[in-house]
């Protein structure tokens, strides 16, 4: 893998807060950043040396963009496969188009994970109401129907409860005919995630597993170390993330979300999903780790040595998202001792929109 | 003082690494940054939402710039007074034009500091060779002749040694007729500095005093806590910085460089100079303090509450500048565990040019 030098150009596809924080990390290493995104008001543009406003299927714009940078990465997995291939034809793309293809489809992702001998929820592909009826008969209820692609923050998901009526045709119609997957419900104690990086030479560095709390399907807070996570379970979580990264020949930061299941006092892990990118549950690393997930991602995609993922001073860390109007509380949060406030420079605080986050370290 | 809201616009005059790091800190708070600098290749432009390429005496450009932002600050003190006044007429300027005027002239600065009852080196104004002869007779040798204005990193300074010939006319000719000041030599043990912030409401927060080592008149490294600095001397150093900030009605971050003099085992402090801006000796605060000097400066100039300046986990911190070709060692430094590498995105590693810095925390 070619090593990018400081002064080199990093291309980022996607202009949201993740792209913004990657761009800032890259700037701290003296890189020039070029962001491509379809929205002219993208938060990442404000901290990038250059930007291109273009749709993700604008072939000419993608090729011009890739031709002007030394390496391309992305902030989110919902990039069309054709786009990834077009970029990769012009510039090194990390993570690879193949890793993206595996992880951006829930069905291929679960099959891939199971193929490594790592458990997931039971699942069945669902394209028709007959498929859904058959899948519910096999997997049982409660279960969750999800679109195979392009879902995030609870979008493209429908819970099917244990009791009550269940009209397969009506449920499927709500997804507009998109290919779906039915996932069995996992009775978990906690949701945890492992954010980790792999370099092209196979080096691997995981941040400590963290516990995640969601509200309305959106991450609300992250706590590290994860409460009640046995040391051997934490080690197993990291082994799972490493096995996944190696099997994908992954380069960059990824996040593996897992369910912690407790049965008869014993802990076991079930993989929920893989995010082939920096992740909201890794924001705590900006102040809480010796290397932030964003700096680590930049290191990996530039062919640089990975940084030390250890927690700063071994302190406990908590991260809270600021969703929608929660960010209006900025003045009070700024005045809280030891609170690190991050705001993403988004114009409008719509409900459910991630406007910022805050991090606190606890000695 | 009006409080700027996130989403508001911060104008920064000057496009070097200090402006770049202020811009990044501002972006982390969701502010839009507009940088004005004369060089089209300014490092701060790469992390700013907007920039203006204009000379510091371009009245039309200055007024257009100030008209587009909510508050103006600057990264260096060598701004013409007329420029500061022009900006302040259009937008709030912090630190103020008056604070700038006092501190950008070594003669007015030393008179101001002495006026507070705070010691400096002995000094005399020098405009002619007769002045210089008289000043040397009074102050004695060794001594240092400096231009009153526009000096930095040893530029505009001439040591006059204790022994040997001393041709006053020739020395002054080397400064091209610029108004000068002769400063008596202070036999110091160490150079320390206090980087601190003052808010418009009078709130004051100092980072721990640090020890600075120079090579070729350029800061080489900073260590905090400062070795051998008695706790009462450290407290006195902070009192001096606070007295200076209050007398200037200062808003923003400033640095006060001091000589630590030891006589008969007793420590005392002599103020060397005041920098009305963020300072190289405060770079350690990015990782080493709960609030970085750049975040603190943004807080102060936006009318926000000051952050906690305490060291992270009470750890010792060292900062080393990367000057000229030292930055070529980036790959080795990236691989050092616990080393935080910062590169400023400057194109050419000229000798004496500050290309980056690194910070290490020691538990």
Image (cartoon, coloured by chain):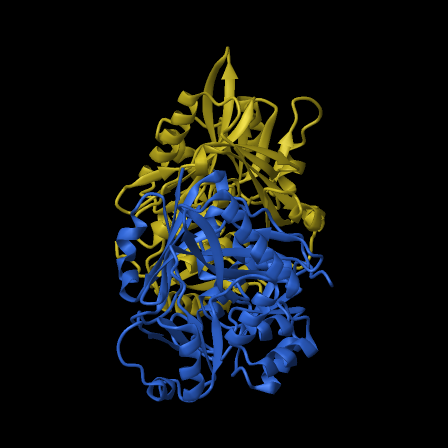
Chain colours: A blue, B yellow
Question: Is residue B83 in view from this perspective?
Answer: no
Q: Quadrant of residue A63?
A: bottom right
Q: Nearer the viewer, residue B92 or B177?
A: B92
Q: Say whether residue A296 is left or right of residue A91.
A: left
Q: Say whether residue A14 is left or right of residue B321.
A: left
Q: Say whether residue A139 is left or right of residue B203.
A: right
Does A60 appear above or below B94? below
Q: Quadrant of residue B184?
A: top right
Q: Quadrant of residue B136?
A: top right
- Quick one: which residue is furthest to the right in this view? A2
Give percent across and percent down for residue A35: 54, 72
Q: Nearer the viewer, residue A77 or B41?
A: A77
Q: Say whether residue B332 is left or right of residue B127.
A: right
Give percent across and percent down for residue A319: 39, 53
Does A66 appear above or below B176? below
Residue depicted at 64% across the width and 76% down the height: A66
Does A327 appear above or below A54? above
Does B326 appear above or below A93? above
Give percent across and percent down for residue B328: 71, 50
Question: Is residue B107 in view from this perspective?
Answer: yes
Residue depicted at 45% across the width and 85% down the height: A131
Q: Nearer the viewer, residue B89 or B47?
A: B47
- Quick one: which residue is furthest to the top in this view? B264
| Figure disc tally | 0
Q: Nearer the viewer, residue B106 or A242?
A: A242
């Amino acid at each position: 893998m070619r090593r990018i030098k400081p002064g080199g150009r990093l291309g980022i596809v996607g202009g949201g807060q993740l792209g913004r924080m990657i761009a800032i990390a890259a700037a701290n290493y003296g890189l020039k950043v070029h962001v491509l995104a379809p929205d002219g008001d993208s938060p990442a543009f404000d901290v990038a040396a250059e930007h291109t406003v273009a749709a993700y299927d604008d072939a000419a714009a993608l090729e011009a963009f890739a031709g002007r940078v030394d390496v391309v990465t992305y902030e989110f997995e919902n990039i069309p496969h054709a786009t990834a291939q077009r970029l990769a034809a012009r510039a090194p793309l990390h993570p690879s188009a193949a890793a993206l293809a595996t992880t951006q489809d829930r069905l291929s992702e679960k099959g891939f994970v199971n193929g490594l001998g790592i458990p997931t929820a039971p699942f069945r592909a669902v394209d028709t109401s007959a498929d859904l009826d058959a899948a519910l008969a096999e997997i049982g209820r409660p279960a969750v129907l999800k679109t195979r692609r392009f879902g995030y923050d609870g979008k493209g998901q429908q819970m099917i409860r244990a009791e009550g009526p269940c009209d397969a045709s009506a449920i499927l119609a709500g997804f507009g005919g998109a290919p779906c997957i039915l996932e069995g419900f996992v009775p978990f104690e906690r949701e945890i995630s492992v954010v980790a990086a792999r370099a092209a030479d196979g080096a691997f560095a995981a941040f400590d597993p963290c516990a995640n709390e969601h509200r309305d399907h959106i991450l609300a807070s992250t706590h590290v170390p994860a409460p009640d996570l046995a040391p051997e379970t934490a080690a197993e979580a990291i082994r799972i993330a490493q096995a996944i990264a190696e099997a994908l020949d992954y380069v960059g930061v990824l996040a593996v979300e897992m369910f912690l299941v407790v049965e008869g006092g014993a802990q076991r892990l079930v993989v929920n999903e893989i995010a082939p990118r920096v992740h909201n549950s890794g924001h705590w690393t900006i102040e809480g780790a010796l290397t932030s997930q964003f700096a680590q991602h930049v290191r990996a995609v530039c062919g640089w040595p990975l940084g030390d993922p250890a927690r700063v001073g071994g302190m406990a860390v908590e991260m809270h998202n600021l969703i929608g109007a929660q960010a209006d509380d900025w003045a009070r949060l700024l005045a809280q001792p030891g609170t690190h406030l991050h705001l993403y420079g988004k114009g409008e605080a719509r409900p459910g929109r991630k406007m910022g986050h805050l991090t606190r370290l606890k000695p």
